[in-house]
Amino acid sequence: MPNPTLMLWTCSQAGCTRGTFINDPAGLASHQTDTGHAPVFGRVISWVSDRSGFMPEILSATPATGPSTGATAFQISGRGLTGATGVKIGTVACTAVSVVSDYQVNATSPAGTANSTQDVSVTTPHGVGVLSGGWKYGA
């Protein structure tokens, strides 16, 4: 599991106007590709714990079970959930989706197949996070 604390840095190449970057492999690769500059880590700006802008990561769904008729309110905990545009159990969209923070989204389960286990997924502008087998429908 990635560490939520990240280092910000700036490029020290003369004339670089690209600004601030997050010290992660994707950010560095993008900067190097876009500008041709080698990564320079000597100029740390600050440490941050905001993961918005990152691929979502789902850690849990609480409760993790509900009746096959749906309508169970539940909470998704994770990271990078800011801007969530949809939540699904299996392939069916949940209702009443509400982003509480970068670490929490609330939703209401749809109806599903009795006695089945389904994945829970959250879609954000940065990708889809999936909790495999994160939801169990009862009878």
Image (cartoon, rainbow, N blue to C red):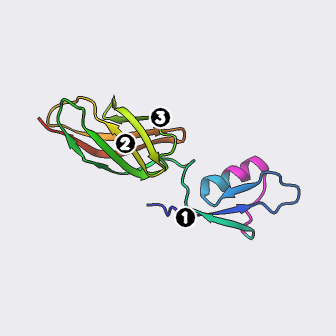
Q: Which mark is residue 106?
A: 2
Quadrant for the N terminus in the image: bottom left
Indicate whether residue 31 is drawn in magenta.
yes
Pick whichever, 101 or 29, lies toward us.
Answer: 101
Residue 137, image x, y percentages: 19, 38
Q: Is residue 23 left or right of residue 2?
A: right
Nearest to N terminus: mark 2 or mark 3: 3
* Residue type at the position of mark 2: Asn
Quadrant for the C terminus in the image: top left
Q: Which residue is mark 1?
A: 5
Indicate whether residue 39 is drawn in magenta.
yes
Residue 42, image x, y percentages: 74, 71
Question: Label 3: how many residues lie within 10 Å, few (<14), some (14-19) or many (20+)?
Answer: few
Nearest to N terminus: mark 1 or mark 2: 1
Q: Which mark is residue 89?
A: none
Pick whichever, 44 or 36, lies toward us.
Answer: 44
Gap in angstroms between the C-alphas marked 3 and 1: 25 Å
Q: What residue sits 64% from the left and 53% below the top?
A: 27
Nearest to N terminus: mark 3 or mark 1: 1
Q: What residue sits 54% from the left and 38% below the top?
A: 125
Cβ atoms at labels 1 and 2 below 8 Å apart: no
Instruction: Find numbered disc 1 in the image and state the secondary structure of the residue it sits on.
Output: loop
Q: Which residue is mark 3?
A: 85
Query: Does 93 sit above or below residue 66?
Result: above
Q: Is residue 13 left or right of residue 86?
A: right
Q: What residue sits 17% from the left and 35% below the top?
A: 67
The magenta segment: 30-41
